[in-house]
Image (cartoon, coloured by chain):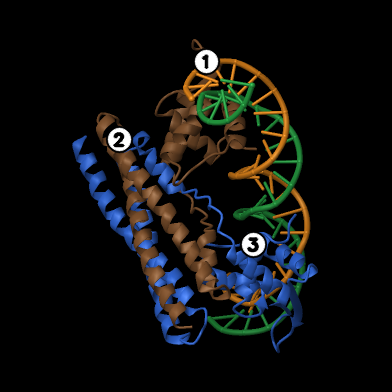
Chain colours: A brown, B blue, C orange, D green
DNA sequence: TCGCACATGTAACGCGTTACATGATTAC
DNA sequence: GTAATCATGTAACGCGTTACATGTGCGA
C-alpha cells in the first residue's frame, strides 16, 4: 500500500492549518471539507501511522490536565514539500456517483410520487447544507480575517453556496414538472 | 459478494430502456449517465454474469452478418421488480470526493498561478460538458418525443446544465479573485 | 498491414466503509 | 449511574479501477 494517497494529502492539508490529533483532523474535516471530502476512522488512523513511519509527520503524546491522552501530529518539512508538489499536479478526474440522480434518471420505472419524495428529501438536505455553509462563511469572515487560508476557504464556500442554491432552484422546477406529469395521468 | 448492488441497479435501469449487450450498456452509460454514474469493465461483465445466474436478466447470443458474437441481455420480470423496489427506497447519501475542490481549499500552500491553472482547466472541462449536455437535450427533444423516459432524462439533463452553468460563473468569479490576490503580493 | 472500434472477460491491487473493540472524562 | 463526547485503533468486507488477455471486422 502506498503511503501518499489522497487520504494522506487531505491529512497533510489539514495539518498545514495547525498541528492536531487524529480526532481533531476528523472534526475539522467534518466542519470544513465535508461537502467535497471526508475520511473515515478506518482510513485516518492507519494513514497517520504510516505517515509517521515515513517521516511526513511527527507525533507528540500530550496529556492535558483532566483529559485523556492525545497524539498531536505535526507536519514535517518533508510532509510540506509533498503537499506542495501534490498541489501543483492537475487534479484527477473525480468519480462522481450520485445515487439520487441515478434514481431520477430511471424514474420512468417508478411512480411520480416516489420520485417527488426523493426530490423533496434532496431539497430538504440542500436547504440544511446551504444554511450551514452561509453560517460558516459569516463566522470565518468575522474570526479569521488574518488567516492566510481565508481567501481559499471563502472560494470553496462560495462554490458550495452557489451550487446548492442552483440545486434548490432545480428542485423547485422539477417539483412542478412532476406535479404536472401526475395530473396528466 | 452481493449480486444486487448499485452496479446491478444501474445495469437494470439501462436494460429498462432496451435489451442490449454489455458493450452497448457501457456505451449508453457514457452517453447518458456519465456525469453522475459510470461503470468500468471490471464491474460490468462480472455483474452481468452474476445477474444472469440469479435470473435478473436473460441472455441470447447473437451473430449478425459480418460482426462478431454479441451477448444480448434482457431484463426479466424478477429484474424489473428488483429495479422498482430499489427506486422506491430513499437514495443513500453519496460520497463526494472532489480532488479539485480539495486542492483549492488548501491553495494557500501553493502559488496563485498553480491554483489559477487548475481553475482554468476546470472551466475548460465545464464548457465541454455544457456543450455536450445541451447537444444531447436538443437531440432528445427532436428524436424521443414519445419515449416514456423522456421527462426524466430531461430533468437529469437540466440538473447537469444548471449545475455546470453555475460552475462556469463561479470559475469566472474565482479567476478574478485569484488575479487580485496575485496583484496584492 | 496497421490501427481502430467492436466485444468480452480476468486478476491484482488499492480504496473506503462499517462494525467491532476499548476506555477515559464530563454533564445531567 | 448513565449517556454523550472524547479518543484511538483493527478486521472484514465489498467497491472500483487498471492492466492484462484475447480476438474480430473494417477502413485507410
Q: Which mark is residue A140?
A: 2
Asked if B57 appears above or below A147 in the picture, the reply is: below
Q: Which mark is residue B23?
A: none
Q: Does the residue at mark 1 contact the one at mark 3 (Cβ under 8 Å)?
A: no
Q: Secondary structure at mark 3?
A: helix
Asked if A112 appears above or below D18 in the picture, the reply is: below
Query: What residue is shown with label 1?
Result: A67
> Are there few (<14), some (14-19), or many (20+) residues within 10 Å of tag 2?
some
Closer to the chain start, of discs 2 and 1, is: 1
Q: Nearer the viewer, mark 1 or mark 3?
A: 1
Asked if B68 appears above or below B133 in the picture, the reply is: below
Q: Residue at x 42, y 35 (%)?
A: A84
Mark 2 on the same chain as mark 3: no
Q: Nearer the viewer, mark 2 or mark 1?
A: 1
Mark 2 on the same chain as mark 1: yes
Residue A158 visible to an observer of this rendering: yes
- Foreground: A122 or B33? A122
In the displayed structure, does residue B46 sit left or right of residue A124? Answer: right
What's the chain of the residue with tag 2? A
Mark 1 on the same chain as mark 3: no
Query: What residue is shown with label 3?
Result: B7
* Cα distance between the residues tagged 1 and 3: 46 Å
In the displayed structure, does residue A147 sit left or right of residue A177? Answer: left
Q: Quadrant of the N terminus of chain A?
A: top right
Amino acid at each position: 500500500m502506498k503511503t501518499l494517497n489522497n487520504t494522506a494529502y487531505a491529512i497533510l492539508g489539514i495539518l498545514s492549518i495547525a498541528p492536531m490529533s487524529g480526532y481533531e483532523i476528523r472534526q475539522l474535516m467534518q466542519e470544513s471539507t465535508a461537502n467535497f471530502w471526508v475520511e473515515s476512522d478506518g482510513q485516518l488512523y492507519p494513514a497517520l501511522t504510516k505517515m509517521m513511519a515515513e517521516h511526513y509527520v511527527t507525533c507528540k503524546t500530550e496529556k492535558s490536565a483532566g483529559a485523556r491522552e492525545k497524539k498531536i501530529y505535526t507536519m514535517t518539512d518533508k510532509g510540506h514539500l509533498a503537499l506542495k508538489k501534490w498541489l501543483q499536479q492537475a487534479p484527477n478526474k473525480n468519480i462522481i456517483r450520485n445515487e439520487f440522480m441515478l434514481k431520477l434518471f430511471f424514474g420512468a420505472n417508478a411512480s411520480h410520487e416516489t420520485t417527488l419524495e426523493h426530490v423533496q428529501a434532496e431539497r430538504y438536505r440542500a436547504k440544511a447544507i446551504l444554511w450551514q455553509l452561509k453560517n460558516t462563511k459569516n463566522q470565518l469572515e468575522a474570526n479569521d480575517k488574518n488567516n492566510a487560508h481565508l481567501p481559499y476557504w471563502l472560494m470553496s464556500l462560495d462554490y458550495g453556496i452557489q451550487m446548492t442554491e442552483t440545486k434548490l432552484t432545480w428542485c423547485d422546477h422539477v417539483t412542478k414538472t412532476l406535479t404536472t406529469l401526475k395530473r396528466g395521468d
